[in-house]
């Protein structure tokens, strides 16, 4: 049995706990160490079960609590070389942090094999992660401007997928953000819209994906019900039925005790 627990999601911080067979990993640590610890406690997750932390990229909403949390619990941190260099130069890690670059072929842990895939975002060398756990597989892809061939290949065939559904295009265009920020968000190095996200889901269902978690929603340019409905409509339009062919949830801004088990 595998489990994904969204601890935090969105511009205020991101972190996910993935577990299989009694051991687990964190993907990102975008809140303070104190907040991460409380979120884990609220979900009855033993910090001693965390074998590693995987970092998608260096932006603060993904690494705010990384240094303190990883150093306090002596947990190794895995990332791309570009992300490692950015974390070091930005002070998000220090000499005590056990930084490890993910080499070709990924990382083997006690119950998981974790590999990274490149994403397009305005950061040093961002990545998503695919986690293979025996006959179960999971992938996370957030903070990406578009769905590249590499991203699609990594997600295809996964049992469960966390994917960005950041903004409603009309809300963003009509919203209060300055033009330069709107342009950045909608660029190939920005964030996935609800529409772009939803258009990928039927292909993933056909490949075997049964569980979706929509993530990294913008507070200013999206609403959970809008993101959910757009993805649901696209799946229904492809003759796919909720609870029969797939499940669909939205990651909460802060953990609400929900988890995806598969």
Image (spheres, rainbow, N blue to C red):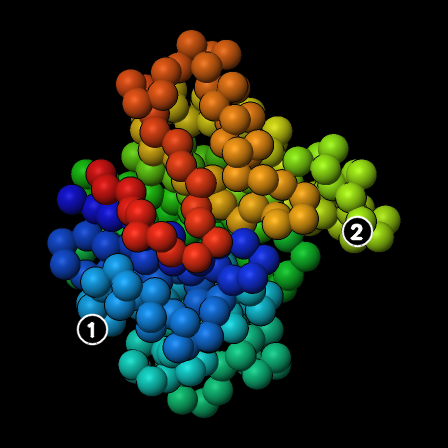
Q: Which mark, by number, is residue 176?
A: none
Whole-percent x, y for residue 226 in the image: 57, 32
Indicate the position of residue 34 as horizontal and vertical percent values. 39, 77
The image shows residue 46, relative to residue 148, as above or below, that is below
Task: Judge from the rendering whether residue 115 lies leftward or rightward of residue 42; answer left or right.
Answer: right
Q: Establish if 17 lies above or below 132.
A: below
Residue at the (33%, 43%) spot, across then down: 138
Residue at (72, 37) in percent of width and height: 171
- Does label 1 or label 2 sit earlier along the sequence? 1
Q: Is residue 144 visible?
A: no
Which corner quadrant holds the C terminus? top left
Q: Is residue 231 above or below residue 134?
A: above
Q: Residues within 10 Å of mark 1 (few under 14, many from 20)?
A: few
Label 1 and label 2: CA atoms lie apart by 42 Å
The image shows a total of numbered marks equal to 2
Q: Secondary structure at mark 2?
A: loop
Residue 260 position in % (x across, y down): 29, 42
Q: Which residue is mark 1?
A: 48
Give the foreground label among 1 and 2: 2
User: Pointer 2: residues within 10 angstroms few (<14), some, or many (20+)?
Assistant: few
Disc 1, SS: helix
Observer-nearest residue: 254 or 104?
Answer: 254
Quarter of the image for residue 41 reads bottom left
To which residue does mark 2 refer?
Answer: 177
Q: Position of residue 56 (x, y in %)?
A: 49, 59
Q: Using the image as rendered, state which of residue 218 and residue 162 is in the foreground.
A: 218
Q: Is residue 39 placed above or below 85 in the rendered structure?
A: above
């Amino acid at each position: 049995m595998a489990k994904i627990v969204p601890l935090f999601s969105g511009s205020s911080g991101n972190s996910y706990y993935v577990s299989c067979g009694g051991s687990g990993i964190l993907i990102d640590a975008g809140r303070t160490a104190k907040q991460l610890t409380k979120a884990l406690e609220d979900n009855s997750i033993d910090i001693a079960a965390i074998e590693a932390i995987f970092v998608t990229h260096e932006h603060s909403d993904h690494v705010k609590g990384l240094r303190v949390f990883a150093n306090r619990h002596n947990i190794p941190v895995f990332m791309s070389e570009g992300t490692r260099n950015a974390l070091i130069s930005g002070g998000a890690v220090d000499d005590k942090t056990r930084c490890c670059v993910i080499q070709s072929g990924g990382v083997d842990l006690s119950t998981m094999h974790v590999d990274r895939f490149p994403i397009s975002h305005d950061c040093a060398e961002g990545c998503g992660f695919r986690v293979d756990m025996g006959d179960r597989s999971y992938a996370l892809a957030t903070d990406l401007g578009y769905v590249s061939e590499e991203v699609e290949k990594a997600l295809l065939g996964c049992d469960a997928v966390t994917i960005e559904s950041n903004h409603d295009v009309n809300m963003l265009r009509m919203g209060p953000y300055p033009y330069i920020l709107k342009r950045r968000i909608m660029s190939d190095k920005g964030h996935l819209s609800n529409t772009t996200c939803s258009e990928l889901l039927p292909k993933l269902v056909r490949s075997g994906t049964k569980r979706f978690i929509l993530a990294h929603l913008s507070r200013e340019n999206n609403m959970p019900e809008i993101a959910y409905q757009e993805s649901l409509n696209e799946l229904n339009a492809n003759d796919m039925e909720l609870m029969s062919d797939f499940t669909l949830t939205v990651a909460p801004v802060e953990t609400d005790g929900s988890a995806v088990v598969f």
